[in-house]
Amino acid sequence: GTLSLTGGIALADNQIAFFGTGTDGRIKFDGTDTLEITASNGTGDHIKLKSNNISLQQANGNNYLTSSAGSATTLYFANAAKLATTSTGINVTGSVTASTSMRVSDGEAYGFGDNSYRIEGKDDGANARIGFITGSSERMRIDASGNLLVGTTSTIPFTLSSGTGAGINSTGTVMAGAAAEAGLFNRIGSDGG
């Protein structure tokens, strides 16, 4: 049946309110600062809060976490939003520190600004590479052989045939395609020389 009360139920500190057959669900307040909610006498693996809007807050109202149905779940530090979920991933406010490494999926990139400036990695055997993109075009790459290619995405400069761009191969040789300069050195006139 149902018990209806108008004044609530008062339990003394450290007393437990039991729920469920076998009293496996429990709520207890320690009288100071801790409210314990346990499931299956502390061995359960599910505690569910169901609502369209959920927030965890300090006593002064500052947020730890907020979550809204169909919208962001946001984590806070000192009441300042730091990480929020989005429909495409997450947004981080501030810096990210990783104890080991940070990875993106093969063929994806670390982007800057509107993502027209980015560093892309591709791991596909002989064509593996790291590409540097500016203005949405690849300007430089390091290929699977360790060659540094600038202004080109192929090793044509190293064959001295047609093509543009220049590069440094894995042994340190600087070469350029027929339509490019392998090197241009200009002395600064203000150095007294």
Image: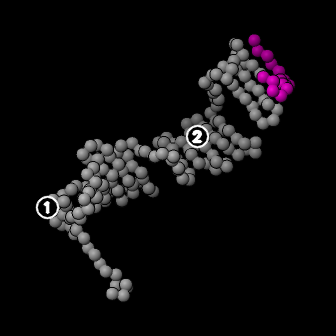
Q: Quadrant of the C terminus?
A: bottom left
Picture quadrant where residue 174 is located: bottom left
On the picture, is 12 further left or further right than 178? right
| Image x and y of residue 40, in percent | 66, 19
Which residues are drawn in magenta? Answer: 1-16
Residue 152 shows in the view: no
Picture quadrant where residue 64 is located: top right
| Mark 2 or mark 1, whichever is nearer to me | 1
| Image x and y of residue 69, in percent | 58, 35
Direction front: furthest residue: 171
Picture quadrant where residue 31 is located: top right
Residue ID at (60%, 37%): 68
Q: Earlier in the sequence, mark 2 or mark 1?
A: 2
Please name the predominant secondary structure of the magenta segment in the image.
Answer: loop
Q: Which mark is residue 73?
A: 2
Direction left: furthest residue: 161
Question: What is the distance, in whole Å, between disc 2 and disc 1 at their CAs?
Answer: 56 Å
Element type at mark 2: strand
Direction bottom: furthest residue: 192
Label count reads: 2
| Image x and y of residue 2, in percent | 76, 15
Q: Which mark is residue 161?
A: 1
Circle 1: residue type: Ser
Circle 2: residue type: Thr
Q: Residues within 10 Å of mark 1 (few under 14, many from 20)?
A: few
Q: Residues within 10 Å of mark 2 (few under 14, many from 20)?
A: some
